[in-house]
Structure formats: structure tokens, C-alpha cells
Amino acid sequence: MKISYDSEIDALYIRLVEGVHQCRTLRLNEEIALNIGANETLVGIEILDAKEVLGGGVLPKVVLENISFA
């Protein structure tokens, strides 16, 4: 998984599946879109106006819980 943020446009992208995928986009609302790949696999999540949508004006802290780096 990879999380990237573009501060110029205040957009956050969470890539759940690595590699190049043919995707269709499912818009949940004006700010949030899901990229759906083959076999209905969720490939990524795009969040526009990320500071407002996620953190009330600031980017929230990312916390990883129960993650094993084996």
C-alpha cells in the first residue's frame, strides 16, 4: 500500500494494489472516488480537498496498528 499527497491540489491517493491496472472510477461524491480494477478489486482511493475531508483543515496523522513487517 502506498499513500501519496499532492499539496498543490490538496489531493490524497491511497494505492492499495501495486502495478498498472485498467480501472473504472466510481465517484462516491465530489471529493471521493474509488478506482476499481479487474474482478472488482479496489485498486485505489482518491480524496480531493483532503485536508477538509479528512482532518477539518489539516492533514491527520497516520497511525499503523498491528502491522507486521516480516
Image (cartoon, rainbow, N blue to C red):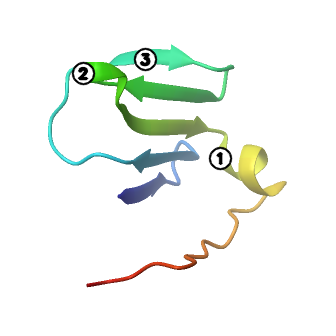
Q: Quadrant of residue 57?
A: bottom right
Q: Earlier in the sequence, mark 1 or mark 3?
A: 3
Q: Nearer the viewer, residue 33 or 70?
A: 70
Q: Earlier in the sequence, mark 2 or mark 1?
A: 2
What residue type is disc 2 on?
Answer: Ala
Please give the name of the residue rendered at 34% of the width and 30% of the height, measured from the top-left corner.
41
Instruction: Find the distance from the CA under tag 2 to the CA under tag 1.
Output: 27 Å
Count of marks, rendered view: 3
**Are the two marked residues, 3 and 2, in contact with CB atoms closer than 8 angstroms?**
no
Label 3: which residue? Answer: 25
What residue type is disc 1 on?
Answer: Ala
Instruction: Find the distance from the CA under tag 3 to the CA under tag 2.
Output: 12 Å
Percent across and percent down for residue 45 are 48, 38
What is the crowding at mark 3: few (fewer than 14 residues within 10 Å), some, or many (at least 20)? few
Name the mark on residue 13: none
Q: Earlier in the sequence, mark 3 or mark 2?
A: 3
Label 1: which residue? Answer: 50
Please give left or right for residue 46 compared with residue 63 in the image: left
The C terminus - image quarter: bottom left
What is the crowding at mark 1: few (fewer than 14 residues within 10 Å), some, or many (at least 20)? many
Q: Disc 2 or disc 1, which is closer to the eye? A: 2
Q: Disc 3 or disc 2, which is closer to the eye? A: 2
Percent across and percent down for residue 68 are 38, 82
The N terminus - image quarter: bottom left
Label 2: which residue? Answer: 38
Percent across and percent down for residue 47 are 58, 39
Please give left or right for residue 28 compared with residue 13 in the image: right
Percent across and percent down for residue 59 are 68, 62
Please give the name of the residue rendered at 36% of the width and 58% of the height, measured from the top-left corner.
2
**Are the two marked residues, 1 and 3, in contact with CB atoms closer than 8 angstroms?**
no
Badge 3 marks a residue whose secondary structure is strand
